Amino acid sequence: MRIAVLGGDGFVGWPTTLHLSARGHDIHIVDNLSRRWIDAELGVQSLTPMDSIQERIRIWKEQTGRQLGFQLIDIASEYERFKIWLAEFRPEAIVHFAEQRAAPYSMKTDRHKGYTVNNNVNATHNVLNAITALKLDAHLVHLGTMGVYGYDTMGAAIPEGYLKVGVLDAEGQPAEKEILYPANPGSIYHMTKCLDQLLFQFYAKNDKLRITDLHQGIVWGTNTEETKRHPQLVNRFDYDGDYGTVLNRFLVQAAINYPLTVHGQGGQTRAFIHIQDSVRCIEIALNNPPTAGGRVQIFNQMTESHRVRDLAAIVAGMVGGEVVHLPNPRNEAEENDLVVRNEQFLRLGLEPTTLEAGLLAEIVDVARRFAHRIDRARIPCVSGWTAERSLLLDRDPERRRLRVVGA
Amino acid sequence: MRIAVLGGDGFVGWPTTLHLSARGHDIHIVDNLSRRWIDAELGVQSLTPMDSIQERIRIWKEQTGRQLGFQLIDIASEYERFKIWLAEFRPEAIVHFAEQRAAPYSMKTDRHKGYTVNNNVNATHNVLNAITALKLDAHLVHLGTMGVYGYDTMGAAIPEGYLKVGVLDAEGQPAEKEILYPANPGSIYHMTKCLDQLLFQFYAKNDKLRITDLHQGIVWGTNTEETKRHPQLVNRFDYDGDYGTVLNRFLVQAAINYPLTVHGQGGQTRAFIHIQDSVRCIEIALNNPPTAGGRVQIFNQMTESHRVRDLAAIVAGMVGGEVVHLPNPRNEAEENDLVVRNEQFLRLGLEPTTLEAGLLAEIVDVARRFAHRIDRARIPCVSGWTAERSLLLDRDPERRRLRVVGA
Ligand SMILES: NC(=O)c1ccc[n+]([C@@H]2O[C@H](COP(=O)([O-])OP(=O)(O)OC[C@H]3O[C@@H](n4cnc5c(N)ncnc54)[C@H](O)[C@@H]3O)[C@@H](O)[C@H]2O)c1
Ligand SMILES: NC(=O)c1ccc[n+]([C@@H]2O[C@H](COP(=O)([O-])OP(=O)(O)OC[C@H]3O[C@@H](n4cnc5c(N)ncnc54)[C@H](O)[C@@H]3O)[C@@H](O)[C@H]2O)c1
């Protein structure tokens, strides 16, 4: 298949590109490299030493003989350039990762909020708009998030995108309807994914676009079969307070004898998926497009749920390390349960890679190998969801101590 | 009250400004005058000869002694300028009209789709973002649309923003929840108002902003008590295929012996409100802010519902004129019912101005007075919702005949 991977230089996009290329697909990456620019802005870097996209592509060609395309296009602000390129390449499928994806970054300041909304909404809308304008018969696979459901949920297990509800019909009689699960985002970032959902709903209805939206859990791990083939194919690994995600951060912290930082009581339950499964799910989704004229196809892309403090305990038990509780920068419930349905991917053949000592140890190894690249001062979260929470963070004694540890 | 009126140069914004100024409020208009630029783009003009905003303000001062402020700011693309101005003016309330508001314009081409999404989402988000960043305790009143509900509704009468649904709780027991009415927009324009709703929901929750969202029906009429005070205070009146709305268009068509153009069978039922009631509703909303920390307050701002073909019959019966059926440019159900709840405004004292011969005749008079300014060629709708519908429009014999009539 001819596949465009938008955001193919990123944490999930790069291993997806290699996975699909290894399976013989013709892959072109479109990326504006904004994520690398944000590294520069924040003064942080991937734990793993990551080469330029051009160099990565050269090594992949050397290793496998397979060519990857790369276009430097900002799909949010360069609609015309994107459309011209799309008209030439005419992909049969488009995988869309190209959004600002960190909740803490999206909450830093008003500049970051505005950037995230503008970038993500325009990126997604431009893709839909260009497909429609070009009458391109391409299947769009989008990476969404479990966070669109919110964690203060409607009650029962979270279904895959659509919720059955009882309403009264025109005659006042009880009737059952299936609706898009009511959006309840917890950050500006998550909110943009809820906006995306409405964009998809509209274009699937009005223009009969074929769209799959993957509501992904938190990705953990770093390497896949393909990124392991050569040191210069290594995937990026974010450990900082803005881009690092919870399990990967605990593993890095444990690896360097830094306290495991739990937000609040750690009663938050979250959904997880290993990076290797993430790329497999995307392949499965590409092989199973919805039919045109139907509704958006939504899969929950996760394999297991865990409570944050339990994860900290597992990692501490395995590697050692002190667990500390910091004020929660987020506006969220102290405790929540989370039961998520994911039968669709299981039915289509996904064999879940679940939390397992071997895999966790592998990540600790990666972290230890590159421990000299870690800036300990960048580990604590710095972005409060509100002015009050930022103040609480600033004043917390435990966190002050960490800043000393970090320095 | 110190009130900022964003989009105060527009069709609803201008009479609202005068209505509030007449009641002693201190009003500052913020507008980028984009609507005047779109007039230039489309080569159409308001049926009524509309002066520059500066001249309108001068006349109002001359007539009433009251000063209006005016800032030329694009709130979608000039966040920093807007924020600086807001920090100086520190309004107690903000009325937000500043969006691209025509569904047909939003569906013209990919450029118009992209413009509408970018303009409307960023405009609304920038307002919320700036209020939050400045810790401004201002009540935000936004003009939304009845179109967020869609016309293929959940069944019973449309509630005011929130729908009670039955779900299963965590124990599998039936429970009742109240959710934001599931969005079902019929155009890119309407979709942006659904996106706005999620932005409001988030900022009301995370930052405790006080927000009222008015789901307005189609506005008809042109003058209010204040715009009648002087010919140069006249309100704008759009009759063209993109910006003209259905009832006002029928009245103009009848006034100049142009066929009354019904889309499809005219089985669409729509909600309406007279411009005089619209400005009164906004005043009522300003006087009844929600409390901080609660959810977004949503009112249905409409006074009656009518089927399009019935409106055509009423106007034809009153003024005369042939009714023609053209292919529907929109992707929508041929027929729909519409029962809308609007008890909140009634309870707060709104006395509805309903469809009535005297008022309709007044509009026909306005149209006849300025008939020489009408470009008949601009009356038919030109923007099809999909490529197929545009083709149908182009090929329709009735419409070809109209183009000759129009020429
Ligand atoms: N990493 C996770 O745990 C996780 C979990 C759930 C969902 N997701 C989603 O998966 C997708 C990929 O996540 P990731 O972790 O790989 O993020 P990432 O930031 O590493 O990658 C995103 C890539 O998109 C590019 N990009 C951003 N805006 C762009 C634009 N306007 N034009 C062109 N390129 C642009 C960036 O430069 C970057 O290379 C995101 O949409 C994210 O929301 C990720
Ligand atoms: N007219 C109707 O029948 C109707 C019905 C329902 C809802 N509404 C809503 O009411 C509001 C006002 O409608 P209207 O008929 O007065 O529209 P309008 O186009 O006449 O007025 C909108 C005004 O906002 C300004 N504007 C647009 N984008 C801006 C930006 N980025 N920065 C600054 N100013 C900007 C325009 O220049 C214009 O003066 C709109 O939000 C519309 O969606 C109107």
Image (spheres, coloured by chain):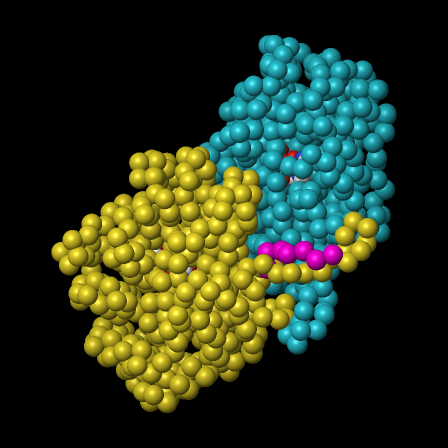
Chain colours: A yellow, B cyan
The picture places residue A76, in percent across and down from the top left corner, at 40, 45
What secondary structure is the magenta-colored segment mainly?
Answer: strand
Q: Is residue A15 left or right of residue B124?
A: left
The picture places residue B372, in percent across and down from the top left corner, at 67, 11
Q: Residue at x 67, y 56 (%)?
A: A177
Is A339 above or below relative to B372?
Answer: below
Q: Is residue A246 left or right of residue B192?
A: left
User: Is A82 colored magenta in this rendering?
Assistant: no
Q: Quadrant of residue B312?
A: top right
The picture places residue B133, in percent across and down from the top left corner, at 52, 58
The tally of labels here is 0
Q: Residue at x 61, y 10 (%)?
A: B404
Q: Residue furthest left?
A: A62
Q: Residue at x 70, y 25 (%)?
A: B262
Q: Residue at x 76, y 42 (%)?
A: B338
Q: Quadrant of residue A332?
A: bottom right
Q: Is residue A373 left or right of residue A315?
A: left
The reply to whether residue B136 is visible in this rendering is no
The magenta segment? A175-181
The reply to whether residue A339 is visible in this rendering is yes
Q: Whereabouts is ligand 2, in terms of quadrant?
A: top right
Residue toward you, A275 or B65: A275
Q: Is residue A285 left or right of residue B3?
A: left
Q: Quadrant of the C terminus of chain B?
A: top right
The picture places residue A72, in percent across and down from the top left corner, at 28, 46
Is B165 above or below relative to B406?
Answer: below
